[in-house]
Image (spheres, rainbow, N blue to C red):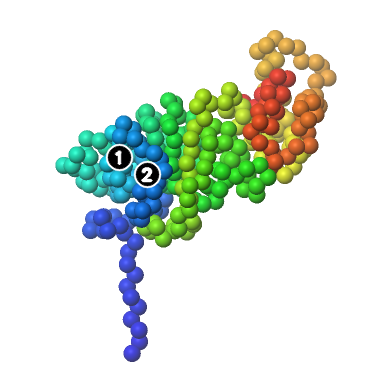
Amino acid sequence: MPKIKAEKKSRVHNEIAKQGIQFNKDFGQHILKNPLIITSMLDKAGLRPTDVALEIGPGTGNMTIKMLDRVKKVIACEIDTRLVAELQKRVQGTPYQAKLQILVGDVLKTELPFFDICVANIPYQISSPLVFKLLLHRPFFRCAVLMFQQEFAQRLVAKPGDKLYCRLSINTQLLARVDMLMKVGKNNFRPPPKVESSVVRIEPRNPPPPINFVEWDGLTRIAFVRKNKTLSASFKQSTTLAVLEKNYKVHCSLHNKEIPEDFDIKQKVQDVLTAAEADQMRARTMDVDDFMKLLHAFNSEGIHFA
C-alpha cells in the first residue's frame, strides 16, 4: 500500500491562523516564537519600569506583551495593518491597552518620538538604514537590543583586519559601542528564515564624536570601495577626484581663497595623504582614530567630502 504523504502544515502563527493571515515575506515577517529568547533579549536590555520602549515590527505581539509588563510604555512601529489589528485585539480591554502606542507605517519614513530603549526582531532587509536612523536619532536613547541576520551582526562588530570588516563596521563603531550577545537558530522563528540570526547590543556614544558624519561617510565610502587597495590608489579614481575638486573650489569660493592656475587636485590629495603618512595605509586595517586623523588632515587643506 503506497505511503500517504503527510499534509504540510501552513506556516501560520497559531494566534492568527483562524484569521487566515499568511506572513508576508516582502516585509521580512519571521515571528520569533521561542519565549526564552524573547525573555533573554529583554533581560539583556536592562529595562526599567520608567522606560519608554520602542519595538520595530512587533508582529503578533509576543515580545510586545512581555515588554509591556516591564516598562511604562511601548511604542510599536508596524507596517502591516493586518498585524496592527491583531495586536490591538490582543491588548483590548487589558491594562496593557493604555501603555501601548502603535505607529502604523514604514519605520524608515516615520519620525520617531522620544524613547529610552529599543528592543526588536527587525525585518532584515532594512537592517543597515535602520541602524543609522537609530544612531542619528535625537534625543539619545540608552541602548538598543536588536536581532539581525548573523553575517550582518558580525559585520557590525568586526575589527580592523577581520575578513568582514567594512564601511558598516567603522561607521557604526564611530557612533556606538557594539557587542554581540547571542546566536539564534532559524528554528526559533515561524516561518524559519533561510539564514541564522544573532542579537546585538548597540549603545550610542553620548556625547557623539566631534565629527560631521556626512563628511566622515563620504571619506569611508571612497576608502572602502576597494578596502584592500592603498589609499593612494583609491584616491586616484577620476570620478572621486572630480567630486573633490568641485568641493575644493566651492570651499575656496566661500572663504575668498584664490585657486592657483596650475592647481592639480590629484597632486593636492596625494600631498595630504603623504603628509598624514596615510598614502600606503589600507582601509581594511584602519581604525576610527586613523580615519579621524585623515579626515582632519583633508579638511584642514580645504578638501571636503560632503
Between 213 and 144, the one lying in front of the other is 144
* Residue 43 picture location, percent across and down: 38, 44
Element type where label 2 sits in the image: helix
Across and down, in percent, residue 188 comes to 40, 58
Q: Is residue 77 above or below residue 22?
A: above
* Helix, strand or loop at mark 1: loop
Residue drawn 56% across the image and 48% down it: 154
Q: Which quarter of the rendering shows the C terminus?
A: top right
In the image, residue 11 sits, relative to residue 47, either above or below, namely: below
Residue highlighted by disc 1: 70
Q: Nearer the viewer, residue 246 or 106?
A: 106
Q: In which quarter of the image is residue 4?
A: bottom left
120 in relation to 213, above or below: below
- Mark 1 or mark 2, which is nearer the start of the sequence? 2
Q: Is residue 23 visible?
A: no
Quarter assignment of residue 20: bottom left
Q: Residues within 10 Å of mark 2 (few under 14, many from 20)?
A: some
Quadrant where the N terminus is found in the figure: bottom left
Q: Which amino acid does label 2 sit on?
A: Leu
Does the rendering let one see residue 245? yes
Q: Going 69% across and 27% down the picture, which residue do you hit?
A: 293
Amino acid carrying mark 1 in the image? Arg
To which residue does mark 2 refer? 42
Q: Do the residues labelled 2 and 1 touch (CB within 8 Å)?
A: yes
